[in-house]
Amino acid sequence: MIRYLPLSFIIFWSSAFVSGQFIVQSASPFAALTFRFIIVAICFLVFSFYFKERIFINIKLILQASITGILFHGFYLGGVFFSYSVGLTATLSALIVGLQPILTNILSGPILNERVTIIQWFGITLGFIGTVMVIGYEIGSSIPLLGVLSSIVALLGATIATIWQKKFTNNITLSVNNFYQAFAASIFLIIVSILFEIPFINFDMRFILSMGWQIIMVSFGAYAILMYLIKKGTASKTSNLFFLVPPVTAVMAWMVLGEKLFVIDIVGLLICAFGVYIATRK
């Protein structure tokens, strides 16, 4: 069962880029994320109480978990959702944040003392080449600069959060860790929503179904798997899975959103998958 967790993570995480496009059609981006993580925080709190886990832990651990949540849910998801609201496609947004493995592998050595081998760097290079091939058709089209900048913010948020999570917050149980992350992110997102947008949510069927998918399959599924993989493995190897997110997102966006997909994209997907295999294999 555990061997299928990386595959499940890739599918669920990629689906968030597609379902997020539907959400921002019915709600302002930060208000939608606030709603999502209030529910997520409550559910993880109930889960922690049910399994009699220790909720009131050391304040230092709470702050460390909160910083991870703000980085992942606030900066990463906030940047991605905002990029949607200004017109960036799901595929291009996934590409930009999909560059995370490169930054993580560069930083994990000096910060986490993780050794990245030549073979791993070869796999990383293949993953990057495959990712660029998948989104090659986007180059030259009308791309909103603000959307690109917000995706770069998301990229930095995800990279720093992955390293921070591995370095500091591995001593907290998964459910308690996720509770404090979601709770801190909710407060952060409420403030951002009030300051930088006119918050609104239309609870139409499109919003309910898309948000329900993100809460259940992404927040409770993909994100929990990601925290588990970071805890059990290295930050560099776990982050390499993100190379598969852009090409898988491209396929999903083609099927669901009608975004273009060419033969070169399929070739890029295969190259990317092979690169991830090389970079993450034992």
Image (cartoon, grey):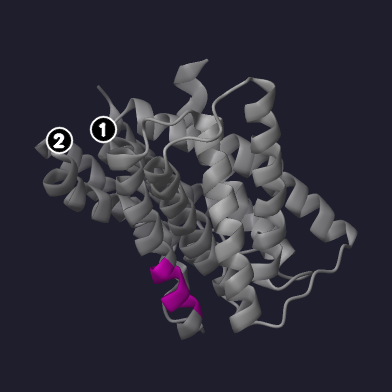
Residue type, label 2: Ile
Residue visible at 47% across and 35% down in the picture: 57
Q: Quadrant of residue 188?
A: bottom right
Which numbered marker is on residue 119?
2
Q: Position of residue 159 (x, y in %)?
A: 34, 54
Q: Position of residue 168 (x, y in %)?
A: 31, 41
Position of 234 relative to 252 (above/below): above
Q: Which residues are magenta?
A: 147-153
Per the image, label 1 sits on a secondary structure element best described as helix
Q: Quadrant of residue 65?
A: top left
Residue type, label 1: Ile
Left or right, 144 with reference to 210: left
Task: Count all numbered tags in the image, as a single digit.
Answer: 2
Residue visible at 40% across and 41% down in the picture: 61
Q: Quadrant of residue 270?
A: top left
Q: Would residue 267 be seen by someone viewing this image from the given angle? A: no
Distance between the alpha carbons at the discs numbered 2 and 1: 7 Å
Residue visible at 18% across and 41% down in the picture: 112
Q: Which residue is mark 1?
A: 278
